Each structure stands twice: as C-alpha cells, then as structure tokens.
Amino acid sequence: MAQETDKQPGILRSLDWWTIGIYLALLVFGWISVCGASYTYGETDIFSLSTRSGMQVVWIGTSLMLGFIILMLDDRFYDTFAYVIYGLFMVLLFLTIFNPHEIKGSRSWLVLGPLRLQPAEFAKFATALALAKLMSTYGFTMHQLKHFMAACALVFLPVLLIIGQRETGSALVYLSFFLMFYREGMPGSILFTGVAMVVYFVVGIKYEQVFLWDTPTSVGKFVVLLLVQIFSAGMIYVYCHDRDKALRIIGISLGVTLLSLLFSEFVIRFDIVWIQLCICAALIGYLTFQGLSTRLINYMLTALFAVGSIIFFYSADYVLNDVMEPHQRVRINVLLGLDEDLAGAGYNVHQSEIAIGSGGLQGKGFLNGTQTKLKFVPEQDTDFIFCTVGEEEGFLGSAGVLLLFLALILRLIHLAERQPFKFGRVYGYCVLSVFLFHVFINVGMVLGLTPVIGIPLPFFSYGGSSLWGFTILLFIFLRIDAGRNLVRT
C-alpha cells in the first residue's frame, strides 16, 4: 500500500487542479444556466428548494461531497472491484426494466420518494471500469478476435438493458467507448465502417425519392452503391497496399457507370441502380477470388465490407419504418429535412434555434431571455439547456462554454497519456469518449445538426443523476491519476 505518513499530502500534491478548476467553472456556469432556464417572473428566492435552481445547488453540493469521498479512497479500490461494480449495476439495469414507474414513455427512472435516479447514468463509470480491468489484463490485445468480442460484450450488455427500458438515447452513449477501442488498437476499418453506415443511412434515406436527371434512378441508391465501390477500392489501397488494383476498380466502376448513365439519358431510360448492383456483385466476386488466390485475409474482409454495406443499406428503410418508434422516425425525418413539422417533432429544435439566434453577440443578460422565460423551449433546463446559454450569454458566452469543454477534453487527453499503467489510460479514454459524445450530440441537437435523442449536457443540465454520474466518472479518473506517483509498499 502507499506509505501512510505520505499518503494524504502525496494525493493532494498529485491531484490535477487544472481539471478540478475546469470542473468547478462548469458547475458555476451550469447553475447560472439552470437559473436562467427555470426562472419565472415574480420569483424572489432562486435558492429556495422549491425551485429548480435551489435544488441544483443541492445536487452540486452533494456532487462535491461525492468527489471528495472518491478522492479519499485508495485508487486500487477501483481496479480490484471493477467487475463487482459492473455486475451490480448490470443487475440494477435489469431490474429497472420491470420498474412500474414510467416517465415520458421510459422505464429508466427509479423513484425513491421525492428522489428520482437513472441507473444508466451511473452504469457509464461501471462499464468504463470493467473495460479498463479487462483491457489491462496480461496478454490482452484488440487484434485478437476473442479479446475484442469480450470488450464489445461489456459495452453491448448495458446497451441492450437500457434499450429494454425504452431509453434509446442513453443507450447510444455507450457506443462512444469505441473511440477508446480505436485508441487502444482497434483496426481503423471498424471505425470507418461505422462512419460509412451512417453516411449510407443519411444519403440513402434523404435522397431515396430524388431521381437522377430524367432517368428512373434513385439518387440515394445510386450514390450509396457508388460509394460502396469507391470505399472498397480505398480499403484495398490502404489495407492491401495494392494501388494498381484500387485504381483499376475505380476506373472500371466510374467508366461503366458513366456509360450506363449516358445510355439511360439519351437512348433507353432504365434504372441504373441495377447496373450498380451488377458492378458491386462483380466487385465482391473479384475480391473473394483475390482473397482465395493470394490467401490475404484483407481482400476477404473488404469483400465482407461490401456485402455488409449493401445489406445494411437495403435494410435501412425497414429499420426506419418498421423498427424505430414513431417519434424517433419523425425526429430523423425532420433532421434530414424530409418533414418540417415545426409544431410537432421539430418544435423543440426550431424554438431553441430562435432562442440562440435572439441572443446575438453578447446575449440578453442573466434572467433576461424572453424565449426561455416564456417557456417556448420544452426541456429547456435539461436536454436543451444550451439554448439558454445562447440567449442570455450570446455568441461570446456560448463560445466560452464550448472552450471550457474543449479545455476539459484536452486536459483529459493529457492525463490519459501520462498514465503509467494501462488500466488508468483505458479508463481515462473512456471518460474522454463519454464527455466528447455528450457535448457533441447535445450541442448538435440544440443547433439542429444531430438527432434529438435526449441526453444531458455535462454539468449544465438540471438533475442529480446526470450530475452525480459525470462527477463520479471524472473524479475516479482524477483519483487514479493522483495515485500514479505514490510509493507502494
């Protein structure tokens, strides 16, 4: 253990006070934003426990106490009991599925008298600890399939349990751990495949009913199938190191596509998508043949990528219309510009954009926002809290908040890279990934750039569960980092 005479001074000296300072600044700005979002004309005491701003002070105070307790525990506690903590929270998530209390269509909240807790917020640090424990074991490598699948299982178990609670937004946050996987050696092709799937979905759905020139060819299908061919050629160039074959595939693909397009436009009109499918089939056959003849698995994996891309694309329409809930489908259609619905699914985003735009450069000032005071923006003190920042603090205040989050992200990268052991580095990048995902998606949905999936802005959104969850997540890492230089006996 650490030497008793030097333990406490050593921890205090080793704490990263820059990160703690950023954390405190975010808490202060977050409380000011909650005040602005929840204040109604005529209130005289913003610290009253009957108000949201007063209760947020309670959540902040208890969060600071939680942070202090976490810092007082031995840093090896988190390594030793990582699996136990993970198991307990998985059981809690499972039991929450059968929770009789339904709030806004979700069963993710446990109601304990006046207190409401969301286990999914706390399961993030439990999952991060379990991943750090698994990936720091001797011999673990992301390049071995069994190790990679074990890590994926730790991530997808809470995802499935949270989806069972009908809380899709919180479940999607856990996919941010794949950013950490990439840092720890996951092949970039997996991350690229995920990005490609998003591109296929967006382009295919958005432009499915748009036709190419005067032909009966869907622009969405045409572009996606062409992208499959280009992406496959790029993977051959990058992973198979075969420049000639990559250029040959692109040349043949573009040449046949151009000839088909000209023939359909000036001779006989037909759906060029059929030609594109034939090209893709020939490409898959060619890659499979190359893989068998050269015994290079990368050719086979590229062929698998092309097959998976086509299957995913043609199943996207089914997922959108038959798998997703109606409100989720409407939100995606609004985001893609297929539906406007300013009085329905697009109302929140439209009103938040108005609020942010009305703030101008310097904002309207503390408690002077008209859009928020008149309650035009639903969930304006939780999921849409950033619109209050934009209206009352303006562009300068919004930029300042984003710079604070950027400073936190950069600081977390620095702390993660200086860890002497893999457990601390993996956990640090888990923390970084979660914060990055929350900030990017939350701010993006307020600005109408990402789907509205209902996740909080760290340290800003009102509520105890999210604030406690983020505090625990961050301070465990700070405690691990503080113990990096302690002398063990």
Image (spheres, grey):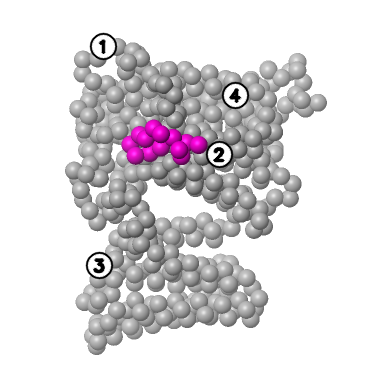
Q: Earlier in the sequence, mark 2 or mark 1?
A: 1
Q: CA distance from mark 3 to mark 2?
A: 45 Å
Amino acid type for the residue under numbered disc 3: Val
Which residue corresponds to mark 1?
44
Q: Earlier in the sequence, mark 4 or mark 2?
A: 4
Which residue corresponds to mark 4?
70
Identify the residue shown where x is 44% and y is 76%. Answer: 280
Label 1 crowd bin: few (<14), some (14–19), many (20+), radius 10 Å:
few
Label 4 crowd bin: few (<14), some (14–19), many (20+), radius 10 Å:
many
Residue depth check, mark 4 versus mark 2: number of the one nearer the observer: 2
Amino acid type for the residue under numbered disc 2: Met
Q: Is residue 235 magenta?
A: no
From this viewpoint, is residue 272 visible?
yes
Boundaries of the magenta span: 95-107
Amino acid type for the residue under numbered disc 4: Ile
Q: Earlier in the sequence, mark 1 or mark 4?
A: 1
Residue at the right extreme, as displayed? 489
Point out residue 472 in the picture as x, y percentages from the top left corner.
54, 29
Whether residues under marks 4 and 2 lie with C-beta atoms below 8 angstroms apart, the answer is: no
